[in-house]
Image (cartoon, rainbow, N blue to C red):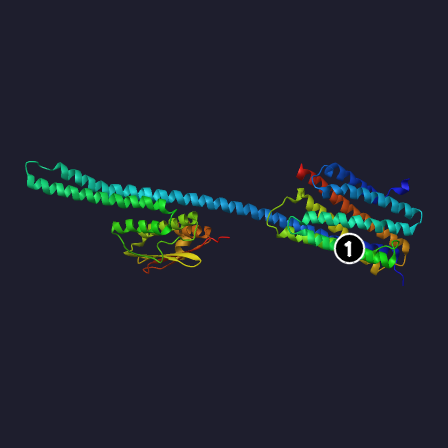
Amino acid sequence: MAKYISINIVLELLCLLAAMAYVLKDKSLIWKSSIVFMLLTIVMEELGRHFNLTNQWKNNQLVYNLLTLPEAVFISSMFYCMLKDYIRSRPVVITGLALIYGLYLYEFIQNGPFLYMNMTITVMSVMFSVYSFLYLYLFIKNEAYVELKKHAAFWWVTGALMYYFGGLATNLLFTVMPFADVDINARLYSYVYVALNLFLYGFWSYSFKCRYQQTR
Amino acid sequence: MSVPANEIEIFIILITTVFLLAPITLVLFVSQYNLRKKRHSEEKVMMQQNYEMEIAKARVEVHEQTLQTVGADLHDHIGQLLSLTNFTLKSVDELNPDKTREKIDSAIALTSKSIQELRLLGKLLQGEQLIRDGLSKSIRYELDWLERLGKLKIEYHDNNPSAKSGLDANKELMVFRIFQEIINNILRHAEATVMAVTLTYLDDMLELQVTDDGVGFDVPLAQATSPNMGLFNMQYRAKMINGSAVIESGAERGTVVKLTVPYDIIT
């Protein structure tokens, strides 16, 4: 049983608890859907871990490929929510989502569902990094002062930026320079992802708290 | 040549740290910039408060100067005329009809003169009120009163007397107060005999120029030795309404004060 508990899962669970405590009664359906997304992530993570422990690599890849679909929708919806205060974000987000789904379909047809969809994940990370930069740019451009300490959107975007930009860099590093020792490769990769998850879920949990205080 | 495992680990950790530092730096930059926005908005509020305070001060000063002028005028002119009328009427001798007629005529003339003086004084008071309707009229009334004192020969040019200046009421009040300060300086220090006032409505700004033929003064020296005198005040107030007050003068060269104020941008 203990094998099924990892640092990443603990972090995800804590973030889920924060989401349930702070955004369960939120007026915005998009913010509220964080709970569903976190729940889904934990279930998929556990499934992935199970397949990993039982050496079912193909199924493990399938699980993460499947998680990409709701992840793209949820993150895009959140960015729509964050960016709409500054620009007409709907066309931007819908175009991005169409591109991700198009690539997903392409890789699905090319390689089937059991091979990790590297291109889709990379493009998705680029897109979410760009959304984050766009948000920060618009935030700076806007003349109004905002108390950052209590600004939910800012912390949510910061979490997403750290995760997707860091993840993108890590993926590129490991793709361009695969190290000879497979064990070292896997271990380092997991360490980096623990760090990225720590940033992501830490900032997201804090943003849920800010959101709760903002809308109370 | 194989690289030791611990070196690879260090290498990966360093690269990952660098990649993580980039977004962290960006977030810190945004946070710092946000603090600047806060300071900027606080400064804006403070500037607005200063501006409002200065407007209120200018309004009180205009009011005080008008009342002082009215007081002095009542005492020096109208009071004298009425005393003279009183004295003339008291000296009427009913037994001497020829002289009586002459004295009554004289009293009538004095009363008419008093009424005329009161009307001018009334217009001066009205001028203070008229700032709301137009700067030209207020300046006109102020100059009319000054001309009547007989101390100065005044030339007034206004390229469009019926025009609205394009400035809001507060800015017009400030211009009027600066104008009053210029006049005060001329009366107190310049020993001038001729004064020319030109009010010009340009396409994008208002220009007010006051020239006198007085003794003049060394502008940098005056600014350095008495920074709190009227000159500083004039320039400070002009700056507050996004304008400028340029003073040109020199010993025995007279003085030129040129005030320019851009119109309010209507968006």
Q: Position of residue B162 (x, y in %)?
A: 36, 53
Decide which of B167, B54 is in the foreground and name it: B167
What quarter of the picture does the C terminus of chain A occupy? Answer: top right
Q: Residue furthest bottom?
A: B1
Give the residue pinned by disc 1: A100
Q: Position of residue A6 (x, y in %)?
A: 86, 43
- Can residue B105 be seen by looking at this rendering? yes
Badge 1 amino acid: Ile
Is residue A206 toward the left or the right of residue B152 in the image?
A: right
Is residue A194 toward the left or the right of residue B65 in the image?
A: right
Q: Secondary structure at mark 1?
A: helix
Q: Residue furthest right?
A: A54
Q: Position of residue B143 (x, y in %)?
A: 30, 51
Decide which of B141, A98 is in the foreground and name it: A98
At label 1, counting other C-alpha atoms closer than 10 Å, the crowd grade (few under 14, some 14-19, many 20 or more) is many
Is residue B52 toward the left or the right of residue B121 in the image?
A: right
Quarter location, residue B158: bottom left
Quarter location, residue B258: bottom left
Chain containing the residue with disc 1: A
Q: Position of residue A185 (x, y in %)?
A: 87, 55
Decide which of B82, B131 is in the foreground and name it: B131
Quarter location, residue B98: top left
- Can residue B11 be seen by looking at this rendering? no
Residue shown at 63% from the left, 48% from the top: B34
